[in-house]
């Protein structure tokens, strides 16, 4: 019984920690997939501050997102950028990597969070960017 209670306390603590994560999301006012990605984050315990922007290129440049990794929306959590359709689980991995400036899912791959289309999923990678501007693989998702 003590083990069960301890496990329940640990689980409750993790859930509370996830609930306290806040991310700022910058997006174009006409983008539907951005809203779907925000819903994915909220469903996974994030609090989202939604910022509607007129010039996303300027936002990306200000936040240091490399153009080769660009997508449609850009998030910021704890000073790190989150570019495109990065899964919530990979944002948690990013937070454990202070050596990275941010993480990105370049383009808009089908099946990534916010880009769901039935059971279809294109292969994609979550790529981190270190302080020297080098890419670091965070996660890889196969096609199905």
Image (cartoon, grey):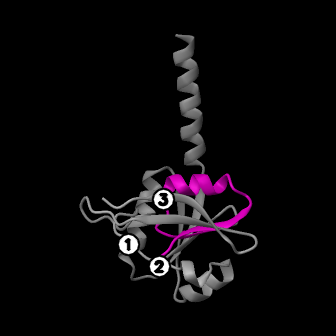
Q: Position of residue 127 (x, y in %)?
A: 57, 66
Q: Earlier in the sequence, mark 3 or mark 2?
A: 2
Magenta includes 48?
no
- Spot the residue most to the left: 118
Magenta includes 87?
yes
Q: Which residues are magenta?
A: 80-106
Residue 144: quadrant of the picture: bottom left
In the drawing, does residue 103 fall left or right of residue 109? right
Q: Relative to 12, does residue 104 appear above or below in the rendering?
A: below
- Residue under label 2, please give it: 72
Which residue is found at the position 67% from the left and 79% from the top?
Answer: 64
Q: How many marks?
A: 3
Q: CA distance from mark 1 to mark 2?
A: 9 Å
Q: Earlier in the sequence, mark 1 or mark 3?
A: 1
Residue 77: quadrant of the picture: bottom right
- Residue under label 1, please give it: 33
Which residue is found at the position 57% from the left and 57% from the top?
Answer: 91
Instruction: Check disc 3 and report its element: helix, strand or loop.
Output: strand
Q: Position of residue 18 (x, y in %)?
A: 56, 46
Q: Position of residue 129 (x, y in %)?
A: 66, 69
Mark 1 in CB contact with mark 3 (< 8 angstroms): no
In the drawing, does residue 95 fall left or right of residue 39? right
Which residue is found at the position 56% from the left and 82% from the top?
Answer: 68
* Badge 3 density bin: few <14, some 14–19, many ≥20, Cα 10 Å: few
Q: Position of residue 75 (x, y in %)?
A: 57, 69
């Amino acid at each position: 019984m003590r083990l069960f209670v301890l496990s329940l306390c640990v689980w409750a603590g993790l859930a509370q920690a996830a609930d306290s994560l806040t991310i700022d999301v910058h997006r174009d006012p006409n983008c539907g997939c951005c809203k779907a990605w925000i819903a994915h984050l909220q469903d996974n315990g994030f609090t989202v501050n939604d910022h509607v922007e007129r010039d996303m290129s300027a936002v990306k440049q200000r936040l240091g997102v490399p153009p080769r990794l660009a997508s449609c929306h850009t998030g910021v959590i704890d000073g790190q950028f989150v570019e495109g359709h990065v899964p919530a689980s990979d944002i948690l991995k990013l937070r454990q990597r202070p050596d990275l400036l941010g993480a990105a899912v370049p383009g808009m791959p089908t099946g990534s969070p916010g880009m769901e289309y039935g059971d279809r999923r294109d292969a994609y990678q979550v790529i981190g960017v270190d302080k020297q501007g080098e890419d670091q693989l965070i996660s890889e998702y196969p096609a199905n």
